[in-house]
Amino acid sequence: MSGYEKMIYMNNAATSWPKPPEVAKAMADAVTALPGAANRGGIQDFDVFDEVRKELAWLMGVSCPSQIALGCNSTWGLNQAIFGYPLKPGDTVLTTRAEHNAVLRPLYRLEQEGIRVIRLHVDDCGRVCPGDWKAALAEYRPKLCVLIHASNVTGAVNDVPTLAGAAKDAGADFLLDVSQTLGILPVKAEAWGVDMAVFTGHKYLLGPQGTGGVYVRPGLDLKPHMTGGTGVLSDRMEMPEEMPLHLEAGTGNEPSYHGLLAALRWSRAHPVDQEALGTTVKELAEGLKKLGCRVIEPSGASTPVLSFLIPGVSSADAADILTGSYDIICRVGLHCAPDIMEDIGMPGGTIRLSLSRFTTREETEEVLKAVQDIVESGL
Amino acid sequence: MKFAWKKVENCFAGARTYEYELPVTGQEFCGYLEGWDIKENHRFRRPVFSAKNGKLEIKGILAARVVKINYTAENWEEEKKETEAWLEEL
């Protein structure tokens, strides 16, 4: 961490920082050690991917770790799920305007190929209204529903048990994007009736970039979006049928998965103090509001994300000053979720502060002082 | 003036923002901008400046060597080329 101590990092919804020290050590050890696949995975060999699957299965509430395919990020998982799901022209996909471009862009491509895509409005906190969802299910009869668990812009957590249950009742499969929640909020994929869940390792799981994937419920067959070598059944032209190899073409990112495994084990031993984190976020929101900022503050469950605007000050300028003048790392703009902006009443984008379990009260106080300076600066 | 430039990752719609690393600080750079509308703001821990000439605006930290330009013209690529030619001449 040397050299970065002065930074106040509030961009955890993009990539979490800092990581537990064990992550870097595990990655360094993996790079210097003999590659795991060197002897083709005998019974006595440590298989980091299988160990990660076991940890993820526990965390995601799924009973079959081998149904978790590991790739390089959520986008990889979403492309596998969306393009691999058996849709044909005329079928309907129900999604929302709160989704990330990792969902919106694959769906846009499907739309060009004759799939109908319904993008449901969300409320002014970025949350799907269950009544609207049920009405859309009844009206459009989708084959597949795609939903973000919590908005990466506002932090609002969707009522997944209700929404997934309604999708099931309507005969639709349900794809849940847990990129913003896994590692910081409970996810119970099987209990909620989730058919596919996509995750990334570098956000609240505290792992490195280059890790992520997709859980697919047993019995749901996705057509592999990528094909290639698997190290087994090499005489066949098609990908192996069994999961996870069915979706895992090519050599995996072994050093990063060692890092992710270290992060997952560290996190299991050090659970998030939800109450303390919630209080920190709430105090920050209150402080921003006292300074006259317009803050999106979702009621109910939320991730430690705050989107806000400083009236009369360009968001880009404010973010430049926060970073350039105060070493506060935040993110500004549309956050790769362009459609939600109109629904939350901030069409030009927001300034986003995303906290983590490591964020201190001293840091949030520094942020408030910096925002106060901006407010009083006459910019 | 020699400089290096890089497009800045920016999540705004239609953003065309570039950073330029200069051989001088923002404070010194402002000395080259005769006739520009220059504003300094010393309210911040590291004071900032903005310099405007017509529609072109350059912003930065006074003590830093990196300035930022968001090209807003319809023919922004031409605007960028002209701005960089002007910078080279400084």
Image (tube, rainbow, N blue to C red):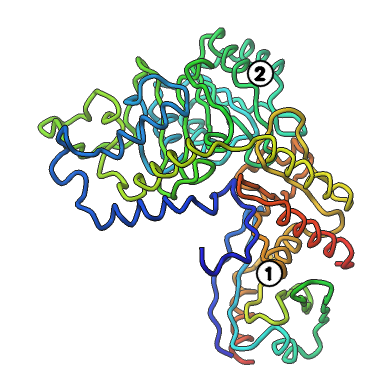
Q: Is residue A182 above or below residue A362?
A: above
Q: Residues within 10 Å of mark 1 (few under 14, many from 20)?
A: some
Q: Chain of mark 1?
A: A
Residue A343 position in % (x across, y down): 74, 35
In the depicted view, which residue is nearer to us: B12 or B42?
B42
Query: In the picture provided, is B29 more to the left or to the right than A241?
Result: right
Give x and y (percent) for residue A371. Answer: 80, 59
Distance of label 2 from label 1 (alpha carbons)? 43 Å
Q: Amino acid at mark 2?
A: Trp
Residue A106 against residue B3 in the figure, above or below = above
Q: Residue at x 53, y 34 (%)?
A: A182
Residue A244, quarter of the rendered image: top left
Q: Quadrant of residue A157?
A: top right
Taking A140 as reference, is A76 left or right?
left
Q: Residue at x 78, y 62 (%)?
A: A370
Q: Earlier in the sequence, mark 2 or mark 1?
A: 2
> Which residue is outermost to the top?
A169
Image-quadrant location for residue A239: top left
The residue lying at 59 percent from left, 26 percent from top is A95
Secondary structure of the residue carrying numbered label 2: helix
- Is A33 left or right of B55, judged from the image as shown? left
The residue under label 1 is: A324
Residue where numbered disc 2 is placed: A133
Q: Out of B35 and A360, give the one closest to the viewer.
A: A360
Residue B62, compared with residue A349, is above or below; it is below
The reply to the same-chain question for discs 2 and 1 is: yes
The residue shown at (63%, 77%) is B66
Chain that bears disc 2: A
Task: Give the residue type at disc 1.
Answer: Gly
Asked if residue A346 lies left or right of residue A353, the reply is right
